[in-house]
Each structure stands twice: as structure tokens, then as C-alpha cells.
Amino acid sequence: MSGTILVVDDDADMLEMLKDALSARGYDAVCVQRLEPALETLRAQDFDLVLTDLKLDGESGLTVCRRANELRPDVPVIVLTAFGNMDSAVAAIRAGAYDFISKPVDLEALEITVRRAIEHRRLKSELRRLSDHEPPPSGIGSLLGESAPMQRVYDLIRRVATSDASILITGESGTGKELVARALHDHSNRKNGPFIALNCAAISAQLLESELFGHVRGAFTDARNDRTGLFVESSGGTLFLDEIGEMPLEMQSKLLRALQERKVRPVGSSREVDFDTRIVAATNRDIDAAVERKEFREDLFYRINVVRISVPPLRSRGNDILLLASRFLERFSRETGKTIDGLVSDAARKLLDYDWPGNVRELENVIERAVTLTRFDKLTVDDLPERVREHQSENFTLAAEDPSFLPTLDELETRYIARVLKAVGGNKTQAAKVLGVDRRTLYRKLDREDEVRPN
């Protein structure tokens, strides 16, 4: 993360040390030694953060806090204070400081606090932007998102939409694979033709064959009339085969032949029928592993996997979570007749910290529920489901609008141990080395967590 930081300290050596430390971590530091020049600099230039000593020559850093909040209320202030001087730290927070750091300065703690403060400022700025109803960002069709992973998806769609190549869309459930398929169709030369979607997992093998290829009267029980299959119905357009990884093996061989010959034979018929359909398939399975395990035909895989588009999970899309939440909030507010202006920043942080195993579909459900339940003009943390409220992020966030959301030292230690264990693949010996404790101490801490963890 980069940013511009105003550093205020009357000690020239301390200023130099802080400037070097911040510059080494990618920040631009502007250093000032006295109060009035610092305030003039703050008036003239936009900063992402103010870092000030509590004791200035003849002045107080608390004045910097108060005046900075008047001049630039969106810019967080971090105060440096003598170690153990908690009264001064509390006074700084009351004066509007975002956080404080004890002297002597631990550079690792400084970096974490600075990064968290700048991230907090940008989060609040993003929430203001979304609440101002700016024009929707560039996207394709009903797909929405500004993140780099989604930009790669958009680029692929634009590059392959006008071809007739078969496309395989992969991604977890709820990521929007059908929206990608529709965007491919809408930007293709076949956009005036039909777009037909079929969930291959929802139909038995016998019925699936009839759905795709059609049937003639009397081909099986209840086949009272001839029926045209989806391959022929979608001629001139796109046939979207969702969850193709769940297709029974006996159907896979028939599908392969149809794709190779560009003909289908309706069930019970001896006559073949031509079709002119573009095939777009999708799966949430690890299709490569399914091919290796002989659960999916390799020859069919290569037939449908001419171009692959991987749709990213929501958890990897950063602020797209807030963008999507904002759009869902607008929609559900309109549908329910409620006037809801947005989310409080703590609720937004909860949304960003959550893992979203159900992806965009789960986020949509969460926002609909929150809009239905809320009694306020902004969504709060209490409006979110328990699984989102109680989710423990690996990021240590100390600043909050409500002090009840500040973690205890035990919670911080528990989260940090979990983060280290995850980083070393669960190896407790290695985790103990990283944490700087012996294995017995680590085991004791883990046992303590198990004792207090609810069943």
C-alpha cells in the first residue's frame, strides 16, 4: 500500500528515522517540526495520514489532532506517545486520533498501524462514493466489478465473444457463471438469436437426452408428441450447459458426437437434424481433476474447453464486495419502500472480512435480509447474519466506530496463532518457531482455545 503521510515531530533525528522507515515501505513522508507549519501544509496538500508526536516544542500533539479533524476530517491521525502513558493515549483518542503508538517506536507495529489507518480512510471514502450514486463502473452486461480479476474476465469476454469457439466457464457456485455466458451471447454475432440455459445436474440421463436432442412421438412413455431438442431450438444462438461436470458418462459420449458432427438424432428417430448453435459450458467442479479420475471424458473436455474463462470468487475481488452490496441495497430498498443510504463503516468492514463461501449469491441474500430487518437509514453490524458478524478476520483491526467491536488481547493472540498456523500449513513445530515460543507453550495455548470454544 502507498500513500502520503504528514509527519510532525520537533526531534530532527526522530523525523529522519520515521521518514526513512516510511519511505522504505513505499510511503511518501512530508516532515514538519512545528505546529503552525504543519497545519499550513495540511491546508495546502491532501494527505492520507497524519503522524504526530504528542509532545512538540511548546505545543501539544493533541492540538494537531483537533485542528487536523477540523481541516481534514477524513484524514486519520496517529499519535506517538511515551510508553505506558495511557492517560495521554486516551486523551489523544478523545481529541480525534485514530490510534496511537508507544515510544520507542516498533517499526513493524508502525507499519501495521499506518497501513490499517490508510485502509480505513480509503474504505470510508469508497462508502461515500457508493452512497453518492456515481454512474456504474465499466462492466459487461449484468456483470459488475472494478477489481483486476474481473477486468481480466471482461477482457476475455470481449476477445472471444464474436468467435464461435466453445467456451468453458469455471468458478465456484454463486460467482455469476451464467451472467458471463449471457454476456458472451449478448456481445456475439448471435445476439439476435436465442439464449437457452440448461442445468445438466438437475435432470436424469434419459430426460437430459430428450431435452438436448428432442424425441419423436412414442419414443418412451408420455412421449405423446414430437419434440424439438434444445440444440435445434437454440440454432442461430447460444446453448448454455450449466454444471456440465455433473453430466452422466453415457450422455457425455452422445454429446461429444453431436458436437463433432453438428447433428443430433432425436430419441426414437432414425433421422439426424442439423443445428447451428454455439456451446458455452460451465462447471463448479475441478474439471481437470475429474478428467484425471476418468469421471469426465477427456475428448469431450478438449471439445468444450477451447477457451476457458475462470470467474473469481467474491473473496478475491476486494472492494467489488462493497460495490455489489451497494447495488443490492439500492434494489432491495426500492422493492421494500425503505430509504436506506448505505452501510456504516463497521458493517462494511465485516462484509470485506467475511470469506463468502456462497459468493455473490450469498452477498445478495445477506443484503436482502439486512434491508428487510433494519430499523435505521444505514445498515449496521447488527443487521448482518451471525455468521458474518462473528467471522474472525485474519486482519487485526483496532479502530472502530463502536468500542464494543475492539478485540481483546486474548482474541488478538488467538487470531494471530491461527494465521501463523495457516501460513505454515498446520505445522505446529514451525509455528512455534515463528511465534517465538516452545512447542509446549503453543500446545497449551491451543488447548486453552479448545476449552473456551463453544461446541
Image: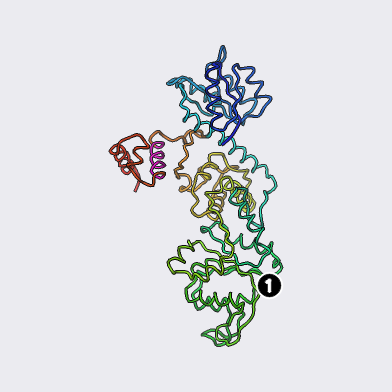
159 shown above or below 347: below
**Colour convention:** rainbow
326 shown above or below 241: above
Give residue 314's position: percent from left, percent from top.
Answer: 54, 51
Q: Is residue 109 magenta?
A: no
Q: Main secondary structure of the magenta part?
A: helix
Q: Nearer the viewer, residue 454 or 174?
A: 174
Seen in the image, is 162 located left or right of residue 378? right
Residue depicted at x 47% and y 30%: 109
Seen in the image, is 113 located left or right of residue 342? left
- Furthest residue in direction top, as rendered: 58
- Label 1: which secondary element: loop
Instruction: Say which residue label 1 marks.
Output: 236
Name the quarter where the N terminus is drawn: top right
Residue depicted at x 55% and y 66%: 242
Residue depicted at x 69% and y 70%: 193
Q: Is residue 419 magenta?
A: yes
Seen in the image, is 72 located left or right of residue 202? right
Quadrant of the rendered structure where residue 429 is? top left
Give residue 108's position: percent from left, percent from top.
Answer: 47, 30
Amino acid of disc 1: Gly
Give residue 246's position: percent from left, percent from top.
Answer: 48, 68
Quadrant of the rendered structure where residue 12 is? top right
Q: Nearer the viewer, residue 259 or 211?
A: 259
244 shown above or below 171: below
Give residue 360's position: percent from left, percent from top.
Answer: 55, 54
Packing grade of label 1 (10 A; few <14, some 14-19, many >=20) is some
Which segment is the magenta one? 411-422
Q: How many marks?
A: 1
